[in-house]
Image (cartoon, helix red, strand yellow):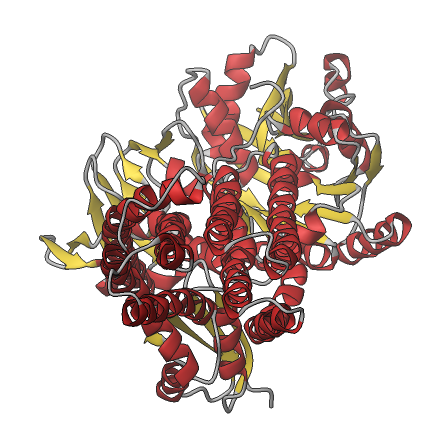
Amino acid sequence: MTVKPEHVTFDITGMTCASCSARVEKVLGRQPGVEQAHVNLALERADIEGVALDPDKLAEAIGRAGFGAVLRRNDFAAHRDADEAQAAMRRADERQTLVRLVISALLTLPIIVGMLPMMTGLGEAWISPLWQAVLATGVMVVSGSRFWREAAGALRGGSANMAVLVSLGTGVAYLWSLWVMVSGWMGDHSGHGTDMAAHLHFEAAAVVLTLIMLGKYLEARAKSGAAGALRALGRLQPDTAELVTLSGSIRTIPVERLAVGDVIVVRPGMRVAADGIIRSGSSSLDEAMVTGESLPVSRGPGDPVITGTTNTDGVLEVEISAAGADTRLARMTRLVEEAQTGHAPVQKLVDQISAVFVPLILVIALVTFAGWLFTGADVETAMVAAVAVLVIACPCALGLATPTALVAGTGAAARSGILIRDIETLERATDIKLVAFDKTGTLTMGAPEVASLHPVGATTPSQLLALAGSVETGSEHPLGRAILDHAEQQGVGITPATGIRAVPGRGLEGMNDDLKLMVGSERYLLEAGIDTTAADATGARQATGTLAWVARGGELIGVIRLADRIRPETRQALDDLSARGLASVMLTGDNEVTAKAIAAEAGVSDVRAGLLPDEKLKIIRELMQSTGGHVAFVGDGLNDAPALAAANLGIAMATGADAAREAAAITLMRPDLRLVPAALDVAARTRRTIRQNLGWAFVYNVIGIPLAAFGILPPVFAGAAMAFSSVSVVTNSALMARWKPKFSRD
């Protein structure tokens, strides 16, 4: 018997760079029962999968590594609370970092101004060594203490991180300057002089710490918005709901206590607390935050409602169909969360480098120091070069490159109604060459509509519709519902027939003014001895779709043609794909005549009709083989699940079957096929942003470290470059967060 893996999530505190996240992953990977551990630096979260996991022991292991760990509970409300608590902590960290930055900047500025004449060669320093030491000590206490604390925790856990590099670099510069100043006093009681000032590096320690603190502040701001999409989704569910009790009274209860079958009241301005079906009342619901639909959608009795949508006008009574973690909003949140905590294939290389990066930099710094001494340089020159190596090598940009872009991209996609399951999906989505579509419910609306009326003899279209509808009032069949809906739209009144009875496999019959009414297949009428040849002159037989034959008093009075209409955006979506050089194919179980008619309307030239689910799967595999494995399949039904799972990229409509959504890698939260090319676009842009970030981070270190080692880049400029590198990566990812789908006709 296979044991299902458990999933445990921790919020991690104290991580500052890629080495930190790599260290936590390594520690977790060694724990009993852990099969896989992913640590996301931008979200400050660890996701662990395994068997018989002990959260307490995992938290202890993380603590021993020098980091904090807070366990997340599994229910949706707890996740929402945890996100809000983490957001509050990030805001507090941002404020604290800003205070440290401002104080450090105010203390550093006099040092820079005072040293400016000497640094520019225009004269002696305006500030005495004593004041340099006092001001630099203030910076070390205010900003340096943060890195000392983090470095101590990392070293206790047996690892080295960015804080270790910063502490060593600035600490060495500060202590060296302090030693030079004290030694100078012992030899020269004047306490100043050009010779001593030239050998002091208080300004380097102070400026580097201030610049790094600037980088940390900008990172903190980026992190505070990193999980914005998740927090926005979490806030959609209200805290309470108005429950209709068995006695008929209304009581306010926490949403966690709602269960399937409960009835709640949703008043104007309130958010829907759980998925359900409207039992009474009509209103317009704003579904923009959940589905991306910009306009309010009209809803009435029998219509479904989604958790988090806003009721704009009428009072609704809703019977709960899914609550808590089973709601569409909760599933959507989980999908976004899973995507944001994933690891890109290229990230594996980053993780491997990060695991040895800091120890390697320490070795390079020592080699730099020894190399300068070996070439005959003095201790100060060697020390300055080694400090510059330590400062510029901080791997902040490397650690932020992938998670910030991933969080920004998947969050932007989610806001537009596109849910990306995992980061591997981003890789696959950028290589698609052909998109295959299911027909019914995907390219089409998935529900029959009255396409045309073909009355016979003296019967008028309105009479035909009224008489057919009078029998269909006793039917729950989709075709009957379509006839009644059309009659309502046309303003045709319906008087229910009497004695309505269903004839299995044939149709319906009832009585109207003592005359027998029959609505059903042509075979049904022929078996009753009714002549149907009068329909030949109406053109009904030549049209595609399903025909409902109507007879009254033993005579044919007309034919109603019903058809599945294509979605309004279908043609534009396929044109957009074609403009990108992607081919389209329709796969359907419908008959060839109907399939080709829909394909012609949609603009699809390649049609495969009359397919069973296993035949769809076979064709998908053939297409994958012919394209070299670059096929996407878009579907919505239960019978589409095998093809969705088999395709290189499965895209499901959220309005379809649960099995389809589970099998797909991308879910479209509203039935707008223009989101298919949009999904491919956001995936491509996210991957491009990740690679740009990583390229920048790698190039920066490859160029910067040698420049520092050879003494070309002093510590002050190394600190500025390090801060600029992190800021550039965060800014590039922030631009990705602004992505919105662009439709060709918008």
25 up-or-down from 429: above or below: below
Q: Residue at x 58, y 75 (%)?
A: 366
* Residue 460 percent location from the top left of the image: 56, 10
Q: Residue at x 30, y 70 (%)?
A: 182
Left or right, residue 237 beside residue 241: right
In depth, the one of 583 and 537 nearer the eye is: 583
Q: Residue drawn 41% across and 86% down?
A: 61
For the C terminus, the quadrant is top right
Residue 76: x %, y % from top left: 33, 62
Q: Is residue 86 above or below residue 672?
A: below
Q: Where is residue 21 shown, x and y percent of the image?
A: 49, 70
Q: Is residue 654 above or below residue 478?
A: below
Q: Is residue 222 left or right of residue 547?
A: left
Q: Is residue 299 visible?
A: yes
Q: Is residue 152 left or right of residue 189?
A: right
Looking at the figure, which quarter contains the N terminus?
bottom right
Between 457 and 724, which is closer to the camera in this rendering? Answer: 724
- Most extreme residue toward the top is 458
In which quarter of the view is residue 46 placed?
A: bottom left
Across and down, in percent, residue 734 comes to 47, 41
